Amino acid sequence: MTEIAHARTPEQAELRLGMMAGLSAYLLWGFLPIYYTLTDTVPALVVVAHRVIWSVGFVGLYLALVGRSGEVRAILADRNLLSRLFLSACVISLNWLTFIWAIDVGRVLEVSFGYFINPLVSIVIGMVFLGERLNRTQTAAVGLTVFAIAIQAVSLGALPWVSLALAFSFATYGYLRKTSPVGATPGLLVEALLVSPFFLGLLLYLGAVGENVLPSDDPGLMVALIGTGAVTALPLILFATGARRLPLSVMGFMQYLAPSIHFILAISIWNEPLSQAKLASFVLIWISLAIFSIDMLRRGRRR
């Protein structure tokens, strides 16, 4: 019997793992705003503090169970890596704070817009710092995306600082993690460990001045705050796994999935107004994604 299936090469296996991890991360991030409606009575900075602290618990327990604590100790012994991971931890903390605050005040469309911008920033970083290049078809897709984002900016009528903060912070985080030679999960734990003393001190201070940072009188809210560690850790682990195996340009275009979900949630659940200009830009962005995806499939088949 002729064997029709061929074993994947190690490179193909790594690429497949990267694609699966990246897509899973963006799906989880897409629906994340729904989760944070459970904590919308808590100040955004307090929620971020809980995210960081409980992430240490969830990720630390996972690494201990799978016997990978030694990787964390190795990272902690490398000062250069610690400096880089401290910087990436600060950047992602800013991203979390902006994201949660925007959801709390009903600016989910701006969240969506920001994550539509982010792929362009990722592509620019990849081209400038990593020497990545796009072919003509992909360049056309990027140009169409620029046009769509310009329509979004005009329709907002003001500088979208929420969107810009989200886009640049997450693109920078992706670059820092891609160029840091650490595993996804151990790296995430070290990031959380490096900034958790600050956030723990913040909670202690806020509690001392009367802020209800541990709502023991509301068990459901407390469970939701603890759960921020899980919903933080899983997609970030998946993202870091994908970012280490895929070009930033691919990860950038893949991220259209999350803001598309945000966009749908904003108009269907939160009833944010949808103008014709915003709808047109949304359609144009999906067309650009389709062009890019078809080109990727064609080149993959030729290989």
Image (spheres, grey):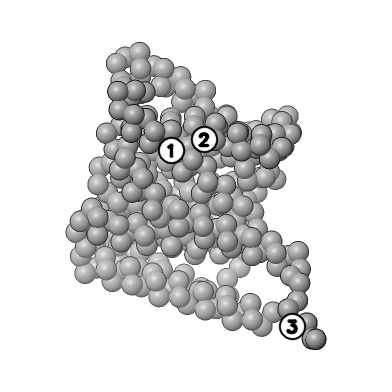
Q: Are the two marked residues, 3 and 2, in contact with CB atoms closer than 8 angstroms?
A: no
Q: Earlier in the sequence, mark 3 or mark 1?
A: 3
Q: Residue furthest bottom?
A: 1
Side of 107 relative to 116 (left or right): left
Label 2 sits on residue: 55
Secondary structure of the residue carrying tag 3 is: loop
The residue that appears at 65% across and 49% down in the rendered structure is 179
Q: Position of residue 176 (x, y in %)?
A: 59, 46
Label 2 near label 1: C-beta < 8 Å? yes
- Secondary structure beneath label 2: helix
**Which residue in the protein does label 3 denote?**
4
Q: Identify the image quadrant of residue 126.
A: bottom right
Q: Which residue is mark 1?
A: 228
Element type where label 1 sits in the image: helix
Q: Residue furthest front?
A: 1
Report which quarter residue 129 is drawn in.
bottom right
Mark in the foreground, 3 or 1? 3
- Measuring 34% from the left and 23% from the top, which residue is drawn there? 216
Residues packed near mark 3 inside 10 Å, few (<14), some (14 to 19) or many (20 plus)? few
> What distance separates the C-alpha of mark 3 from that of mark 1?
46 Å
